[in-house]
Image: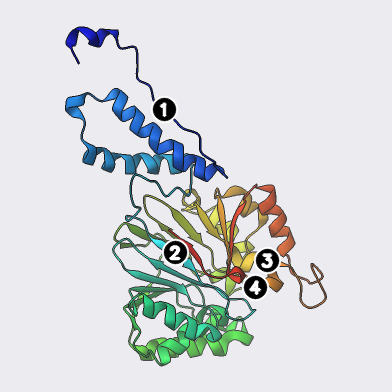
Amino acid sequence: MEKSREPKILGTGCQMWGEYTPNTTRLYYQIFPRIAAYAECGWTKAADKDYLDFSQRVKNTERRWRKLGYFNQQPSFSKQDDTFTLWQLPSQINTIGNSYVIRTDNNKVIVMDGGVKEEENYLRGFLAALGNVVDCWFVTHPHPDHIGALTQILENPKGITIREICQSTFSDDLLDMEPDYKEQAITYYKAFKKSGVKNKEATPGMVLNFGNTSMKILGIKNEEIRENPYNNSSVVIRASDPVKSVLFLADTGKEAGDKLLNGLFKDELDCDYIQMSHHGQQGVSMDFYRTVKFHACLWPTPTWVYNNDTGNGFNTGHLKTMETRETIKELNITEQYFSFDGVTKIE
């Protein structure tokens, strides 16, 4: 353009065409990248325009959008190859369990618990598809619905390599507090010791980094809590990278949850995805869910727990799931993923 004409330019125009947008996620997907490109074209001098540089900077712009609450985009301008993939594994039998797998941006594999012993074969197949190497296996606490499958894998790996297990090892006194589960817990610890797998003892504030993915320990065993002792000694872990974050509460009870809310890491509890404590009932308090900011729920929950149906119909059991469901509804959280619905993949 001739220099003499430049002062006559009043601004730039951007044509946005109408498309069917079934929800706000698609709205963000379509409009926001175009606004970013429009701003780049309108405000950047021609001599300074660099598409490759713009492509890198727009990733940081997208992260800022997410921090403002614009979630779940898979932008058209770039592939999200710098974030971890999370799978919530489906229930193989209609019982409680807790099984998550993470693949980091640099292809490291992380497992959270693994579920009951009946989930062993499914878990083996899932890990085989990812290469049969687990770089870190987090054990939150030694209840059978969390360490059943892992115990059997430790006893007979069948080709699975586990590089290390991160856990908060129970003392004999803590093991004695739940006689009904002590024997299974000891069986797990014996299998672990015999396996020769490296132990990484969890400590508050510990951070394990895998590429862009950080796994931070926010809570460990609480031997001073005598109520609901095993669950209240769950390791609490926050998985995060520049794109998203997940808070794994395992079976944390009210007492340990209150300790987290008042502890050193209370400002680090906010997350994008929260794993519902103790399968969504009689875990942390409802005030915990009201205090922590999150936008989506992960339910490691069978149908009968979710519906409080122990055999006599909907909401006829003794479980507290309906209280949790009402609280989530009250918080206007609509993005929810259930293990009874099948495998969930979050990228």
Q: In this figure, which residue is indicated by the disc labeled 4?
A: 302
For label 2, the SS is: strand
Q: CA distance from mark 4 to mark 2?
A: 19 Å
Which kind of residue does numbered mark 2 sit on? Leu
Q: In this figure, which residue is indicated by the disc labeled 2?
A: 86
Is residue 270 visible from the viewing direction of this image? yes
Q: Mark 3 vs mark 4: which is more N-terminal?
A: 3
Proximity of marks 2 and 3: CB atoms separated by less than 8 Å: no
Proximity of marks 4 and 2: CB atoms separated by less than 8 Å: no
Question: Which part of the image, by quadrant, shows the N terminus?
Answer: top left
Q: Position of residue 129 (x, y in %)?
A: 37, 77
Q: Residue at x 39, y 35 (%)?
A: 34
Q: Nearer the viewer, mark 4 or mark 1?
A: 1
Q: Nearer the viewer, mark 3 or mark 4?
A: 4
Q: Mark 2 vs mark 3: which is more N-terminal?
A: 2
Q: Which mark is residue 15?
A: 1
Q: Is residue 333 left or right of residue 74?
A: right
Q: Quadrant of residue 105?
A: bottom left
Which kind of residue does numbered mark 1 sit on? Gln
Proximity of marks 3 and 4: CB atoms separated by less than 8 Å: no
Q: Residue 317, relative to residue 191: is it above or below?
A: above
Q: CA distance from mark 4 to mark 1?
A: 49 Å
Q: Position of residue 262 (x, y in %)?
A: 55, 52
Q: Which mark is residue 282?
A: 3
Which kind of residue does numbered mark 3 sit on? Gln
